[in-house]
Amino acid sequence: MDHITKDQLKSISFWRDLNPQLTISSDPLNAIPLQTINGTLLSNVSDSLWQDGYLNCQGIFAEQDIHLLRQAMERLHSNDLPQAFIYLYDETWELFFRLRSLLQNFLGENYNVLPHFWAWYIEPGKAKGWPPHRDSADQSVIKLYGQEMLVSLSLWIPLTDATPENGCMSVLPLSCEQDYDTPISDPSQIALQDILCLPAKAGSVLGWRQDLYHWGGRSHLSAKTPRLSLSLEFQNAALDPLCNPLLDPKHPPIPEERLNLIFEQFEKYKHIADLPESF
């Protein structure tokens, strides 16, 4: 990182040169193909989301869908650059846009992207994911005309196999939390026996309602590979914005706006993210 200047960090051409296999443009995503999700799987994960607050879709993306992004994140890591810069590239936004049938199933035909995202490179035996937290303190489900409606949803995509050894995700299932005598106000109140570990193959899609406790594990000395992953958050467009600016999934921010958003993430998550001192 010492050899990279702040001017370079703010230069779109620098990022294009760093990962020439990816693109940075202002093009809309209308032509991006829809990712097919089996109807039986969609039904199963719907049951899981409403009962336990999370969804687990294994093996949605093929290796060819994710390997260029993984290469780019390896290059960011080798240059000691925060992984969040992967959101400068079109392919990151495209990957999530391909999941629009999944998102529409839970958030309605029209949904927006929240300006909240992150990316992780968890080194084997040296690092850990974020500690137990909720993405939002507000309730993620409301009742409208007698029907439950999901307000917001977080999606998480591993680009490498996420295992218990290298720090896969864990959650406190909603059905377990509902058995507590009083609402959980601090993660220390989570009973260890209630924790559900969620190993995931590279290219899987995990997600959770935003009031669900979740966290990334520690990478142990037995881990054979790093854990690389991406996250992005979404909300039902029919409801008042949870945060501004809401983003149109078909029109990701233009490159300069993406860069500004990335620097905003550093400020937003500095209390929880492991960042180089210069950030």
Image: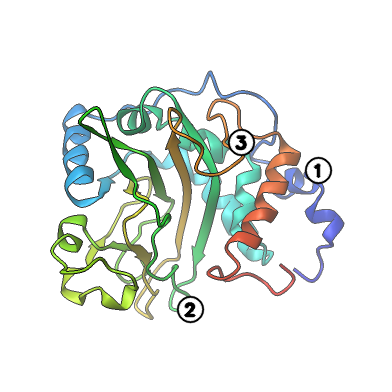
What kind of element bears circle 2?
loop
- Left or right placement of residue 276 versus residue 213 in this view: right
Residue 86, position in %: x, y?
61, 49
Residue farthest to the top, as pictured? 31
Q: Residue at x 61, y 36 (%)?
A: 90
**Can residue 82 be seen here?**
no
Residue 235, position in %: x, y?
44, 37
Residue 90 disc label: 3
Name the amino acid, label 3. Answer: Asp
Pick the front one: 246 or 193: 246
What kind of element bears circle 1?
helix
Residue that mark 1 sits on:
13
Residue that mark 2 sits on:
126
Q: Quadrant of the N terminus?
A: bottom right
N-term-proximal mark, 1 vs 3: 1
Residue 170, image quadrant: bottom left
Q: Quadrant of the C terminus?
A: bottom right
